[in-house]
Every structure is written in structure tokens, then in C-alpha cells.
Amino acid sequence: MPSYIAARVPKSHYDVVLIGGGIMSATLGTLLHELEPTLNIAIFERLGRFARESSAAWNNAGTGHSAFCELNYTPLQEDGSIDISKAEKIAEQFEVSKQFWSFLLSKNYISDPKTFINSCPHMSLVFGKGDGEFLRRRHEKMTQSHLFQGMQFTTDHNQLREWIPLIMSHRKKTEHLAATKMDMGTDVNFGTLTRKMGRFLADDSNVDVFLYHDVKDIDPRHDGKWEIKVKNRMHPKKYELTSDFVFIGAGGYALPLLDSSDIPESDGYGGFPVSGEWLVSFKPELIAQHQAKVYTQATVDAPPMSVPHLDLRIIDGQQALLFGPFAGFSTKFLKEGSYLDLPESVNFSNIRSLFGAWWHNLPLTQYLVRQVAMTKDQRMQHLREFVKDAHEDDWQLKIAGQRVQIIKKDEEDGGKLEFGTEVVVNKSGTIASLLGASPGASTAAYAMLQVLEKCFPDKVENEWKEKLCEIIPSYGQKLSQNPELTEKIRAYTKEKLELNY
């Protein structure tokens, strides 16, 4: 029996409690342990393994989100210009993650990078002359930034047949397509990566890891500490303990736990759960013809997480093709959650936000209803927009993970649906939570650095500063403003992560 599954009783007090066994808690736990090894840290995960929910390989697209191919990160402005500022930020944030993983490899905390990250070109593909002109202008704007130098653009069918032969098969020569290609893209198995970090924390550090332990409630104490109620799901035992600092990285369950903390910063937050499904093929003949991640534009009223894409995936050494995601709706906040999650999350502080977001997003609701009602044959029709001669027998339906999109207060509309990742911290910096979805796991290291900066500002500026710069060599500097540093960092991470672009 692995050491961290063995029956143990939590201590009565911890310096740090991390809730959830996904990539966020694993990242923060590793950072804190490295910065201050004497910290008394505990991780509580309700399931029997790290990375069973959002971080699990088949519960996400495995895209190392670096803004190379995601068109929703480069919106078209009302004046006709293309804003790449969000793309630059996300590209910088993924570089932070790659530096963090490279550090873990250099310290032998984790090993075998090809088991969790592999080179995979990232492409954007659009159909029609209008969208083709947008992509050309986007490429022109993005390549002005050194973060996207090397991005190729083409409308030439011969070139496209070299890049994406599966998609180009049976295409008419008169059909107008345009694509960009960035060879520096990656496919990431966040589940394997998370479990590697979890194994290090459980076996080679003084961090206490408790699987099958469900945190039920978080209450503030008069002395500034937090009282935490934990249930052992394998035995009829309940524990109460205290902690100086709490991080809620529990995916969809972060929202109700944050609400239980009664901090003012949680007021007005609500959640909109969205589920998903993939069409997956393991057929070698198809995989050989598609060795890239190819994103296109979302349909009208579709959430950003539903941007259609056809991807190469590499999971546990096996290659596969993945198409989707097809959005769905469930009242669960986790894949292995309860159908009561959404109704039980409604309270007086967020009901106006929830109603406002629903009222102002009726087209999204209608879109989800249509998606839920789709048959496999209808999903195959969508796939055939990419792969003209796709055969139903070559593709199987696979359930993806649950995502809880953030709903925030809005003075004008009551509530506003947010697509992204957000860190919520109380005024005293003693509790933090991560809410939201994409780009999520790709930017985990950056997000957890935000937690450190907001919750431990004095330590970050003083005794932790030198170590942080060792872990993240670009720490405190903007790569978008420093071409030489960017080139140096990318060369370093390419070597450590054994990438071959």
C-alpha cells in the first residue's frame, strides 16, 4: 500500500492546508515546500488518487495553452484592430510553467519528461475568405511580438496537405482555407505530471498527504486561524483541525468551500457548470495523418471551452486523436460530484448574480440544450467539417471533465459570466481559492506564484526572493519586453523538457 494511502490521523494544526489533489495544489505544495521546508503542510483529496478530476488526461484537451492557436485569445476590436495582449500574457504564463517543471527535473523531484510533455505543433485553421483575411492579419500582428516569432501562415493547399493531410483529404481545390502553424506547441498530460509531484510530496518531503479525505467546512476563528472539518471517506471518522493558511484548489468544489469560509471577497460569486464530451480515435492510419493540434473558431454563442479542435494526444505512451469538445450541462460541480451541487450553491449573496448571468446569456443556455440533445451521428457531422471522410466506426465517444465557469457580481447586469482563471484571496491573505477554467492547468505555476505574492508578500520580497529566481529564472521580468531572455529561457526549457521542435 502506498505510504500516502496508509491510514493516518491528521495533526491538530498545520501551517498550511491545501484542499484538492489537482495540479494547482500539487504545484503550490511543491513551491511552498521548496521555499520553506520546515512548513507543516497537509493536502486533502476526496478521491483515491491525485488528478482524478480536471487534471486527469482525458478530462482536458492536454493543450499546453501558450496562445499559439487559440483564436479567442486574440479578439477583433470594434475599430478593426486585433488585440494580442491576452495572448502575450498567456504565452508568458506558460513559459513560467515550463521553467517550474524544468526546475523539478533538474532537482530530480520528477523524471521522464516525455511521459508528461511532448512537442506537438499548434495550428489555427479557418474556412472562407473573410476568416482567412482575419487570420492573415492576426499572424501579421502576432509575429511582431518575439513571443510568436516562427509562426507560419499559408493559404496554399499543397502546404496544408503537408501540415494536415487528414483534414485536407477530399478537399476541393476551390475551397478557401487559411492556417497558421507554430512548431513550438506542446501536448501535456497534466494527470501524469500532477501525480509525479504528488508522489514527490508524499514520499520525499514532510508534507502529509491524505487521500479519500473530504473537507466539508472551513470556518474562521477569532485568533485568525481557520477551523477545518474533514471526513475520512474510507472509515466513519471525522476530524477537526486548524491551519494558519488554507488554499482551496478543489476544482468545481472550490466555490462551495469558499462560500463556507464567510469571507467578504466570496460574496456574489456563483458557478455555471459545463460538461463535455470528445470523439476519440485510436486508429493508427488516421493518427499518422494528423500530428498537430488544430483549433478553429467557436460558433456563435458557444463558450470558449467549446472551440472545435482536432488534436493529437499522447497519453501513457499511446497516441490518439481527439475532436471536440461537445458541450453539455450537468448540475454537478465535479465529474464525481453530486447533482445537488448547483442548487446547493445558491444563496442570498449570489442569487442576483446567478439570475443576471442567466438572463443575459440565454443564447448560451439554448446552445447547451442543443449540444446535450445531439446524437453521435450529429457529432460525426461536425467532425466531417474537419475530416471529410470520417467513419463512425473509427471514433468513440468519451466523457470529458466538468468545468465550473465563474459568475461574478455586476452592478449593471446583476451577474456576469466570466471565462478564465481567477485567484480569490481574503484581506489578511490567510485563505486563497482558484476559480474558473481555461487556460487553467497550463498556467498553474503562474497562478500559484500569484497566491504566494498575495498571501506571503513579505517572504516573497525578502527570504524567498532568491529561491524563486532559482525556480523561475525569469521571475519578476516580462518576457514580452525581453527578446534575449525569452530566447535563453526557451532554450533552457527545451533541453530540460526534452522537446524536439
Image: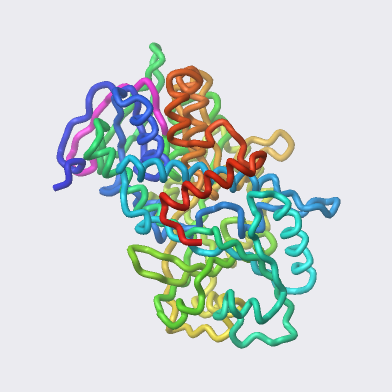
Place of residue 392 in the rendered image (x, y in percent of width and height, measured from the top left): 47, 83
For residue 140, what is the image quadrant? bottom right
Q: Nearer the viewer, residue 353 or 483?
A: 483
Residue 34 appearing in the image: yes
Left or right of 263 in this view: 408: right
Look at 19% across and 43% down and name the residue there: 5
Label the magenta part by its dominant secondary structure.
Answer: strand
Would you place residue 15 above or below residue 166 in this image?
A: above
Place of residue 65 in the rendered image (x, y in percent of width and height, measured from the top left): 54, 53
Look at 73% across and 52% down and name the residue there: 144
Give the residues drawn in magenta, as a range.
232-247
Would you place residue 497 above or below residue 226 in this image?
A: below
Left or right of 93 in this view: 11: left
Residue farthest to the right, as pictured: 79
Look at 30% across and 28% down and name the residue there: 41
Q: Is residue 243 magenta?
A: yes
Q: Is residue 201 magenta?
A: no
Q: Nearer the viewer, residue 47 or 452?
A: 452
Would you place residue 209 above or below residue 147 in this image?
A: above
Exactly how many numbered labels are in the figure?
0
Residue 355 appearing in the image: no
